[in-house]
Amino acid sequence: MVIAHEFEYFKPESVEGVIELLLKYKDKARLLAGGTDLIVRIKDGLEFPEAVIDIKGLTELGKFEFKDNKLFIGSLVTFNDLIESKIVEEKFPLLWESSKTVASIGIRNRATIVGNICSAVPSLDTGPALLVYEANVVVRGTEGERVISVLDWFLGPRKTALEAGEFVYGITISLPEKKRGGSYVKLGRYNGEDLAQVGLGILALEGNEYRLAFCAVGPVPARAKKIEALLNGKSLTGLLIEEAKNLVPEEISPITDVRATKEYRLHVAKIMFERGIKAAVERLDGKGPAYGEKLI
Amino acid sequence: MKKISFVLNGEKRNIYVEPNDLLLDVLREKLGVKSPKYGCGRGDCGLCTVLINGKSARTCLILAIEVDGQEILTVEGLSKDKLTPLQESFIKHNSFQCGFCAPGMIMTATELLEKNSNPTGEEVKEAISGNLCRCTGYTPIIEAILDVNKK
Amino acid sequence: MEEFKFIGKPVDRLDEREKVTGAAKYVDDIEFGPNLLYTEIIESPHPHALINNINTSEAEKVEGVVKIVTGKDFPYKFGLYMKDRYIFAQDRVRFIGEQVAAVIARDPKTALKAAKLVKVEYEPFSAVFDPVEALKEDAPVIHPELGNYPHVPWFFPKGGSNVAHLRKVRKGDVEKGFKEADFVLEDTYRIPRYAHCCLETHIAVGLLDYSGRLTVWASSQSPHTQRNLFADALAPLGFSHKDIRVIVPYVGGGFGGKAGVTMEVIAAALATVVKGHPVKVIWRRDQEFYNTYMRLQVMSKIKVGVKNDGIITAFEITNYWDAGPYAEYGANVVNASGLSATGPYRIPNVKIDSYCIYTNLPVAGPYRGFGYSEMLFSVESHMTRIAKAIGIDPVEFRRKNGIREGDSLPYGAPMNPNGLLEAIDKVAKEIDWGKKETLNDPNKAIGKGFAIFWKAPAMPPNVSSTAFIKFSEDGSLNVIVSGMEIGQGYLTAMAQIAAEVLTVPPEKIRIELPDTDRNPYHWQTVASHVTWANGNAVKRAALQIRDRIFEVVHEVYHYDKDTLYLEDEKVKCKLHASFELPLKDFVIEGIQTKDGTYRGGAIVGSGSFMPEFTSAQQDPETSQGGHPNVHYTVGAAAVKIEIDKQTGKVRILKAVEALDAGKAINPMNVKHQIYGGLLQGFATALYEDMRFDENGKILNPNFTDYKIPTSLDIPDEVVPIIVEVPQPDGPYGARGIGEHPMIPAAPIIANAVEDALGVRIKSMPITAEKIAMAILNDKKEVDDFLMIMKK
């Protein structure tokens, strides 16, 4: 209940201040934004930082704007900020839909999408959306700023492409040029909040282009390249969907744990694909279920 | 020990905290504010919920030091003079049984009604879905919230 | 029909304002001052091991540590129905999480740090986690001294084995009964462990003051029984009841988990080594899962014989219960449900064997339903199957075989008046039983499931309940009792009873929370017997006061006592319409007579209730004779569900439940119990899913992975129905209903799934996964039991 582990707390007011502390404390430093992951891990004895660096003092990290067809989401932007944003709801509805499935309001008021991708748990709900939107991660370090494609971001469970002395400044998502529809389908054990046992994000773009990404069924969230290769350029038929469903087992490697067996995850992943892609295509045409409506 | 100061239920408070002190413990043990409760320590149950700058938050996952300069509202703050229409509605509907979920539920519902004074049943259920209740089956709680501003 | 002013009315809850304003205090909200000490428990990482050595030297050096204790400091046993457990493990540990030592420190962080430095050397030996495995010859014997343990006379432990108790019921001749049957169905059902998940975790604060008086504040359903157990456990230290005081403020949920004594004894014991300092023991959520009581696991082997017309001729059940390593309370779950394992049916030939078996999983014990929630899954699943097998409608089957007043119970005593048939009819009507509903969507299926249920309070035959009542100058009342408000609305019901007799409205009545020094005895707030037992005591106390009032008025005014009555807080007389004496004018100050002297004075009343017809003296081989249960509350329930055939997910469209409350003292609170209890039961049926690893360690002791219902999980519609066939010895005809709403939830889901899909799932929980995989693999029967996860 209490945290016995002792650490120092810092609240720098500039990017340089953050980097200075990161260099000083190296892998004994942890950044704190929403804290909904870090604090649990410290309590569970899974993290023993010497320095907790609260980045909520950097107002520039709160930048949240849509400019020049690009959405910039600063590291302090919370899930509820995303959900309450009309821009996200209208222009990036897949991200909006994914965000709504994360935990509950009391968590979403603090938890950040940047924190989510930095925790890089295999089941993170924002992984699929960011992968199919082909977002970019803006990183600041001693060398200044660099941009890492989210496609190269996830390296393993709780492992990202971030290097020593670096921290995430924000995420950018370019507005896709083509008309599109999307869906995020999430398997949970009941209707209440749950970590995904399978998560699938789909973007269907005008001209028969399809992007799919799974989470929770492999060590990292990843694009389903085989299925994309099968579908791209073709219009969706029942036969094609069946064929694509048969590729699902080749795209994912679910495990059995307390939440679900791998057989069930595999089975439902196929159903999720079928319902998800139909909804994405319908939404592309301005029809289909409203974003936010549960498909399973 | 670091000195922090924040507004608690309308009053500015100064207090010394260690970096690893949790806000829930500081509220309960150092500031005598007992309404937020310990339920799980992981943000899964909502019992520790208060409003920070008007937004519901899980105090079991917040270091006390993080709220320096912020504003916190708890059930004690709502109950100071007259009760809120929401509280009166809960009393009228006999919504709570053991009462342990009540403070967290009340703060979450307070936030909801600030944002949306006439929510639908689905919106209420969604808003309070992070506040667990083991006793009531939720129906009397939902009815009370819907009844507050019913036209 | 008698017209009541307060009984049967939806009177507002007495405690609602306190709970809505944050005024309600629970144990951890009480300020114990700067001398409060904190604890951290050192727990066993092994399910079954000898303790070879405990080294506390490093931990003792930590500044702020006040004392470290181990089993050596408290070699005392305790237990409610059997003394088989210890305050701290002695020579061995018997489950992962068992308390081995405790650090007491000035602040919680220090306690946590120091606890990590305590080194314990264990010598593990083989453990057993399955009740049937634990019966085998080569299973490790968990209590080698079982044969010497003191226990209540109606328990039958088998020394030298892992059988803590065996309840045998033999009525009629089952062999003959099966021969007479036209059809016999036999099968096995498995029900895993479940957790209460009270939102307030267990907590106890103990203080031994410098004069040697021990006070324990605990979140408890049983202050007097706790005091009794503390006195028993600490008797070697010289304590007896007068030296111990237990105080219980509001309790954040009990559901049976805070009955008896589990971790509270640790606070009582630790207090004795830090005299003058209150010491707090509070459980984290994970400890709440593995070191309190869990609901027992059971494997039911059931065999039922019926004639072609649907009449049951024989019923045989063997229940193998896993009670964990300490069965002091769990054995009574086995006992009570064993006596009633047939369900509410009239059956001439019955054979029940209910085994309470030790295992090295965590301790199991009382949970809402007390064995009935567990085992009625088997019985009511089985009854629907057998009805369908012989072509009889499952509801009609219940009507034919449902137990009537006067019928003989499995142990021979007669069944009390009850509204079972009325409940069946009302539920069947409300759920539109018989009407098959269809859907256009080929991916969805709709099904309906039905069940009947019963439960009697499971208690020793001599439990008492008492009450004191006193007035204040404004005519308000304090009713001083030791029942617990755990959320069920008990305070309000007692106020309504006192109000009805004394005509003081509930808003002017306070019901005082227990303090064993001041509040008179009540056994435990369990068993759904408190409205009945304490209600009777409160009514008796109120009647005593009323008699006293009439006596005093008679003495002064000379009106005949039987012409006097109370109305609107005044004494009135049938023969003198103008006579009106407000209670507040004399209940403290007495009535002044013509000569200036006074009569009466402060008026108080007391009431005591103990059933005088119950006896646990039964034939140990057959359970015949005796009258162990006071009465049964019966009911019926049904559910309509929609299943997504691809994902297996179940949506509850409508749930209906009828309970025979005898007389619903507060119909609103009865309905609220139905909402809460049904949801709790549905959760056990659909997604609460406790898992252990192969070493008996619980894998999901948190809400992240043990899912209890949220507001998004409630049924689309719930219809509560109250039936009222009066309980002759209940206050205003009332009997208890607190546990009952949960009991039928699991079998109605199982039966609805079968109705929708033709798939019979014989193990709980009935998860979306089990349903989907059954459909996918075209299985008609599923018995997957996943509680222990193999690698």
Image (tube, coloured by chain):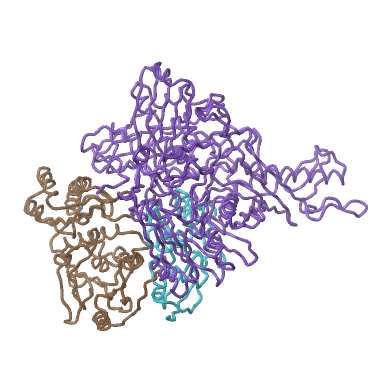
Chain colours: A brown, B cyan, C purple
Residue drawn at 18 percent across, 60 percent down: A220
Q: Relative to residue A103, is residue B71 drawn left or right?
A: right
Establish if C679 lies above or below A177: above
- Residue B124 image offset from top left, x and y in percent: 40, 55
Q: Relative to residue C715, is residue C647 drawn left or right?
A: left
Task: Looking at the picture, tell me which residue is in the foreground, C291 or C511.
Answer: C291
Residue drawn at 33 percent across, 69 percent down: A34
Q: Quadrant of residue C375?
A: top left
Q: Relative to residue B5, is residue A96 drawn left or right?
A: left
Residue drawn at 34 percent across, 53 percent down: C124
What quarter of the picture does the N terminus of chain C occupy?
top right
Q: Relative to residue A81, is residue C462 drawn left or right?
A: right
- Residue C85 image offset from top left, x and y in percent: 48, 50
Q: Residue furthest front?
A: C52
Task: Looking at the picture, tell me which residue is in the foreground, C603 or C320.
Answer: C320
- Residue A178 image offset from top left, x and y in percent: 13, 61
Query: Can residue B151 be seen from the camera position used here?
Result: no
Q: Residue furthest right?
A: C595
Task: Looking at the picture, tell me which residue is in the foreground, B128 or C477.
Answer: C477
